[in-house]
Image: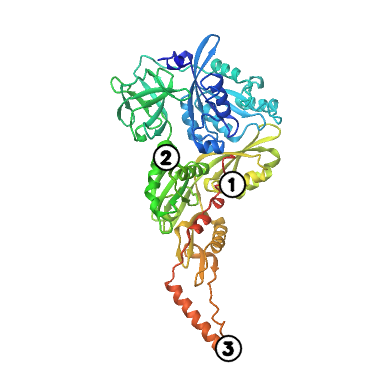
Amino acid sequence: MSTFADRTFTAPERIRNFCIIAHIDHGKSTLADRMLQYTGVLDERSYRAQYLDRMDIERERGITIKAQNVRLPWKVEDTEHVLHLIDTPGHVDFTYEVSRALEACEGAILLVDAAQGIEAQTLANLYLALEKDLTIIPVLNKIDLPAADPDRYAAELAHIVGCEPSDVLRVSAKTGIGVRELLNEVVRLVPAPVGDAEAPARAMIFDSVYDTYRGVITYIRVVDGKITPRERIKMMSTGAVHELLEVGIVSPDAKPSDGLGVGEVGYLITGVKDVRQSKVGDTVTSQRHGATEALTGYREPRPMVYSGLYPVDGSDYPELREALDKLQLNDAALTYEPETSTALGFGFRCGFLGLLHLEITRDRLEREAGLDLIATAPNVVYRVSLDDGTEMTVTNPSDWPSGKVAEVHEPVVKVTILAPSEFIGAIMELCQTRRGQLGGMDYLSESRVELRYTMPLAEIIFDFFDALKSRTRGYASLDYEEAGEQVADLVKIDILLQGEPVDAFSAIRHRDSAYAYGTTMATKLRELIPRQQFEVPIQAAIGSRIIARENIRAIRKDVLAKCYGGDITRKRKLLEKQKEGKKRMKTIGRVEVPQEAFVAALSTDESGDKAKSKK
């Protein structure tokens, strides 16, 4: 087996590059496990469930976050083939990982749960693969489940992919039924890679990770020529030149090899410590007699959701910066920049692809760097035009301009919802309350419907997914993609304590829902902030107009306790004296908002971060 894996160059006609795409929890990682076992690269002693999920957080949640590639040997009729498999994530927030994996493949296994059928993310990933002209192999998984209905879902899948129901393969990744036949079909259907072995070397970077000891490990797919150790290579977008210390394959762990030829997938190590030198989508070529034309790359990921991350203990700020630097090496979609809040101190404004991405990032920072973090309520990017003709981009409510606003442009997304047809009314009502516009509706079968809406992104990132799940008893699935921007009537809501705005609680909302946010936040803070020696007003304001108010009553000492009987004027005199003292205290006193109040008020319950990996 090892001699097979270490052979220098494999003939392109014997190589098959493919990935597994599916909705979350449809069995991608389990199918990859069976393939690792049946091809012999993983023995019984080394085996563990979800072998390719390397991170603790992936194993705990049972979801794939990072795409992983592995090289598998497979024999069909005495001919040895090399299969390059990439296991991809299924959640909408990690579509960027999927799009990168598709660039390195010629075929894709479209995996569908035989008990649940097609979900929104299945369709999204299928369209991504079709855009890249990949060969699609439709497969139904979990056929061993008592609730499985393979005939019904095979017909549904055949209708979407454009094949016959009999062409849909049926497997059980858990028990191994049909997996060998699937590997044979991959060899038969997926086209071999095409490239010129004699041309100057050209390889596409489709992923890179950071290793503390070895520096940046770059994963590449060779298109033309060959890449060998100890030669000097050039990154075509930056012009940076490095010496190759090691070239190898992943089968299932990293193994050095003599080089990589046309169509092969493997890794490079140059000893570079800065991941920006190995930009995903860049073309690698030889320094001497290198290629002149780069390969077409990817589009850069655009953050969809912004949130501020602050350390609970201000002295942890340098550690947070270092942890973000390291995390960005492994997560190309994460963006961040420093920001300051009068209430929370120093922190970072981070851009994420969605709420699960935000939650996973925060979780990884807390685990890997041992930090305690506060995340402010997520918000999106707005383009604000002022009356004087100037335009500015707002990613944080505290950046909202104080001048006269002419119009505000907010990002909108195309939303695809798949659900049983009995819930159409409930879904339409929910989408209309969230300012959604119906774009179309299709019946995939008699009992399942696909609804397409255009909605503001800001309405999706709070608790939309939770509301959708509760109204459809958990049967609906959701996917969204960016669709430009629209003009909207948006306002900034300030929360004032004793007349002073607290920037951490500010929010940008549509005018129609501003009052609801103001009253909710004021009520919440009244319960969270401890009572002071003086009365504290909590107000929600749009500009100079107060829209909601709550009072935190003062702690009063019973100054009349010593008055037993006697004249009422004496009691009144004591109460007036106390009143004067409270008034003076109010002018010099400051309202201290405890850290717990910030954590609770900005807690993810309110910000919709509950929309977790169930998606």
- Under circle 1, the secondary element is helix
Mark 1 → mark 2, Cα distance in angstroms:
28 Å
Q: Which residue is mark 2?
A: 327
Image side of residue 115 versus residue 344, left or right = right
How far apart, in angstroms, are the residues tagged by discs 2 and 3?
69 Å
Residue 564 vs 610, above or below: the answer is below
x and y percentages locating residue 244 in the rendered image:
33, 24
Give residue 401's position: percent from left, percent from top.
41, 56
Look at the numbered disc 2 and give the secondary structure of its residue: helix
Nearer the observer, 241 or 394 = 241
Task: Depth check: give the residue in front, 215 or 275.
Answer: 215
Please give the label number shown on residue 601. Answer: none
Give the residue type that dot 1 points to: Phe
Residue 37 visible within the image: yes
The residue where tag 3 is placed is 568
Percent from the top left, x then y, of residue 448?
68, 35
Q: Amino acid at mark 2?
A: Leu
Amino acid, disc 3? Ile
* Crowding near the residue tagged with mark 1, few <14, some 14–19, many ≥20 C-alpha atoms within 10 Å: some
Q: Horizontally, is 614 left or right of 252 in the view? A: right
First reached walking from the N terminus: tag 1 or tag 2: 2
Q: Earlier in the sequence, mark 2 or mark 3?
A: 2
Q: Are marks 2 and 3 in contact (CB under 8 Å)?
A: no
From this viewpoint, which residue is outermost toward the top?
Answer: 78
Question: In the rendered image of this protein, does residue 81 appear above or below residue 148?
Answer: above
Q: Is residue 112 above or below residue 416?
A: above
